[in-house]
Image (spheres, helix red, strand yellow):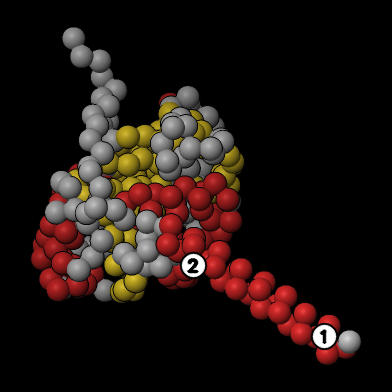
Amino acid sequence: MLVNKRIILNVSLLIMVLSISTSINAQKSDSPLKDKKVLFVYGGWNGHEPELTRDIFVPWMKSEGAEVHVSDNLDSYTDSTLMNSLDLIIQIWTMGEITNEQEKGLLNAVRRGVGLAGWHGGIGDAFRNNVEFQFMVGGQWVAHPGNVIHYDVNIIDHDDKVTKGLSDFHMHSEQYYMHVDPNVKVLATTTFTGEHASWIDGAIVPVVWKKMYGKGRVFYSSLGHVAKDFDVPEALEIMKRGIRWSSVSLYEEPEMWLSPIYPRK
């Protein structure tokens, strides 16, 4: 009787392990990241904790079935063999400088359909002298009045896959005031109170957007000043969904839109 109970217990444990394994494999097979080749480039100003955020997103992408090449050198953009093999580039590199050759490799890859995703200063305040890079990203940081403060993020597109099902949420971090291309597709915004800069009281600035650059999908979120910001579930989920969306530029039809804020006569 004891032997039979042990056999039943062992069989039950085996079934449980197989069930969990099957569930994980099913999640991988369903993810747009499965079998995608990703270049994760990190560096620049250490205040934005590029290594800690690397350690959040690289393991997650691998768990979704992606093949991830990690680099702390912008010369990766000049490696034509590597760049021609990619589906997606993620960059977290605040400020710094990029050479003409490095920038050319990155721009050309995205133009031909490689996706690009990033957050906060990693692409929203990188390479301040390079306007073509800013044209690709769709915006550039200019201020964060009050530095680390309490503020709200408002979801304004409830139909897009990136923000569908999400509600407005609260952050305690840098509230980015940005210069933004008026033709990006804005998914979330934030409203400034004027407490730290009275002349922008009531100003609404995009927080999350998507756009095209050539054939490449570009995704940006201004959240993520430090790794702990991604402890906020909505901030993390938005970034994960944006990464998935931008990873399929080469395989899905471009999402084409122009949504100018200025009315046509």
Residue at the extreme right = 1
Q: Tell which of 215 and 168 is nearer to you.
A: 215
**Residue ID at (25%, 61%):** 87
Task: Confirm whether residue 130 shows in the render.
Answer: no
Of 150 and 17, nearer the camera is 17
Distance (Cα) linking label 2 and label 1: 31 Å
Tell which circle, 2 or 1, labels the residue nearer the N-terminal end. Answer: 1
**Disc 1: CA contacts within 10 A as few (<14), some (14-19) or many (>=20):** few
Residue 39 placed where, x, y %? 29, 67
Q: Which mark is residue 4?
A: 1
33 shown above or below 264: below
* Residue 133 x %, y %: 20, 51
Image quarter of residue 181: top left
Q: Residue furthest bottom?
A: 3
Q: Secondary structure at mark 1?
A: helix
**Quarter of the picture holding the N terminus:** bottom right
Instruction: Give the position of the C terminus as an image quadrant.
Output: top left
Q: How many marks?
A: 2
Q: Residue at x 37, y 56 (%)?
A: 32
- The x and y percentages for residue 192 are 49, 31
The type of residue carrying mark 2 is: Asn
Relative depth, front residue between 107 and 23: 23
Is 236 left, or right, of 199 in this rendering? Answer: right
Name the side, left or right, on which 91 lies relative to 83: right
The label on residue 74 is none
Residue occupied by mark 2: 25
Q: Amino acid at mark 1?
A: Asn
